[in-house]
Amino acid sequence: MIDNTVGSPAFIKYRTLSPTNNCPRPYPSEILNTKMHKADVYSLIDKRKGQIQDYRFTSEIKAELIQQVAANAMTGKPTSSRSVSEQINQRCNLVLPDRSVRLHMKKLGLPKISKSLPTLVEDLKKTPSNDH
């Protein structure tokens, strides 16, 4: 039978040692327990913010993305992230990963309008304008 009490050698054997002073590091549960005693439930809330600014997808690249999706939707070409990424790569010499293109297309709401855009433009062509 393994002795799992705190002072036993078996207990310390399973803990990782700190590289600076060779003392056992506290378990994540011990860290959470200490934080709970100090800051209550607020310590358990996820405080990560993520990437705040788009570094690779600038406003110019997003404009190219919108333009390419709109052009593909109007001409009946595929509006998938892979085809849009390849076309932007050929036209602008920008290497954009498919997943990133898909993420930004979704953020901009482009998949929702890609099917309705051609009919909207056709309807606008049929209605007379008052600019004459």
Image: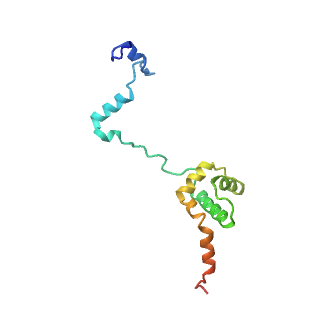
Q: Residue at x 64, y 59 (%)?
A: 79
Q: Is residue 58 above or below residue 115?
A: above
Q: Position of residue 37 (x, y in %)?
A: 27, 33
Could you tell me which residue is drawn at 42 percent across and 43 percent down?
A: 48
Picture quadrant of residue 70 = bottom right
Q: Residue at x 42, y 18 (%)?
A: 22
Q: In this rendering, is residue 7 above or below 109?
A: above
- Residue 84 placed where, x, y %? 66, 56
Residue positioned most to the bottom: 132
Task: Say which of 48 and 121 sits in front.
Answer: 121
> Among all residues in the image, which is located at the extreme front?
1
Query: At x 71% / y 57%, what residue is drawn?
Result: 91
Q: Quadrant of residue 3?
A: top left
Q: Is residue 38 left or right of residue 57?
A: left
Q: Quadrant of the N terminus?
A: top left
Q: Residue furthest right?
A: 90
Q: How many marks?
A: 0
- Position of 40 with respect to 20 (left or right) is left
Q: How is the image coloured?
A: rainbow
- In the rendered image, the quadrant that contains the C terminus is bottom right
Task: Name the one closer to the observer, 87 or 54.
Answer: 87
116 and 19: which one is in front? 116
- Name above or below for residue 97 compared with residue 40: below
Give how far across and how far down residue 71 sits, in percent: 66, 65
